[in-house]
Amino acid sequence: MDLGIKGKVALVAASSKGLGKAIAFALAGEGVNLSIFSRSKDSIELTASEIRRGGFQVDILPSVADVTDKEQIDEVIEATVEKFKGIDILINNAGGPPFGFFEDFESHDWQNALQLNLLSGIYLSRKIVPLMKKQNWGRIINITSVAVKQPIDGLILSNTSRAGLIGFSKTLSNELGEYNILVNNICPGRIYTDRIKTLAEKRAVQLGIKYEKAIEEMEKDIPLGRIGTPEELAALACFLASDKASYITGTTIQVDGGLLRGLF
Ligand SMILES: NC(=O)c1ccc[n+]([C@@H]2O[C@H](COP(=O)([O-])OP(=O)(O)OC[C@H]3O[C@@H](n4cnc5c(N)ncnc54)[C@H](OP(=O)(O)O)[C@@H]3O)[C@@H](O)[C@H]2O)c1
């Protein structure tokens, strides 16, 4: 299927690894030019060169920036617009906040989590929406977590900050409909990236079991019986970013192999 986005420009945040990287690859496969960034120069340049080696007919601009640093984000946006003359697709993504329970955290931990998983997406949207409005076309896709539908024990920082992003993006989708800018959220369940590997390693140590056993434990309550791949999530991101998703906005869709048991 031709998704109809060849030649468009995507800014993919936090894209040197994991979900962001897989989304960048999938968009490149659709002929979308890419501005990608993360905090590590080596990692983001490595990812850019891997995508270039993929033989896609696209241009790539890798940058070093922290999603929580407004000046660095401004610089990325400026460089992107200078190179590509606009931004059509914004993928809001970041790392995840630390694991822990209510009494484990101080005020600065709460502020950092809100900055990382809520305010960064709001800031990027604030800067890029005016560009999208001018062209009467835009896609904003937020990478969140199934925690927005069912809070996950031991992840109170994530549960709290991501819920705010859902309220923000649903409201934004209402406001931006008339400009043909669509705003949607993707909720990963358990997708095999460094974040899941770290979690499995910790569980293995805590329970005194092997890493493979910890992964098996994590797969037990997933109806599809396995952890997902980043490419499986990237496929949805690509579709939502496309012209084919032209009547889908304000949604929050999980990619979780059936992990969540609720109706919505
Ligand atoms: N994988 C899952 O199963 C799963 C499930 C639920 C939710 N999520 C959420 O989905 C998001 C992506 O997860 P992932 O699994 O892809 O994680 P990952 O494999 O650990 O990759 C995180 C990426 O984000 C970049 N990054 C982290 N903090 C950043 C920051 N402050 N500024 C800019 N870039 C930053 C990292 O690169 P640098 O280190 O170079 O900055 C890396 O490229 C996270 O918010 C995670 O909590 C994931």
Image: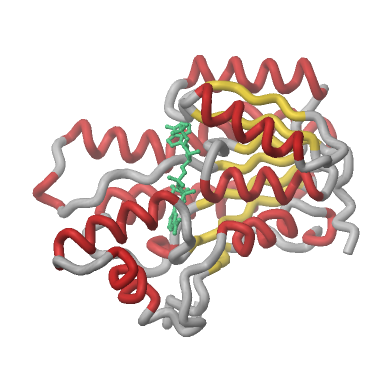
Specify how the rendered protein is coloured. Answer: secondary structure
| Nearer to me, 74 or 225 | 225
53 to the left or right of 250: right
Quadrant of the image occupied by residue 147: bottom left
Res 232 → quadrant: bottom right
Residue 174 pos. (x, y %): 64, 52
Q: Please state which of residues 212 and 236 is positioned toward the viewer in this rendering.
A: 212
Q: Quadrant of ligand 1?
A: top left
Residue 53 percent coordinates (x, y): 75, 37
Check the image and report above or below for 157 versus 45: below
- Which image quadrant for residue 212? bottom left
The correct choice, above or below, for 211 with respect to 25 in the image is below
Q: Give percent across and percent down for residue 10.
A: 72, 37
Give the x, y percent position of residue 224: 51, 82
Q: Residue at x 39, y 57 (%)?
A: 196
Q: Nearer the viewer, residue 128 or 39?
A: 39
Image quarter where the N terminus lies is bottom right
**Residue appearing at x 30%, y 64% in the figure:** 211
Residue 40 in the figure: left or right of residue 208: right
Q: Is residue 217 above or below residue 111?
A: below
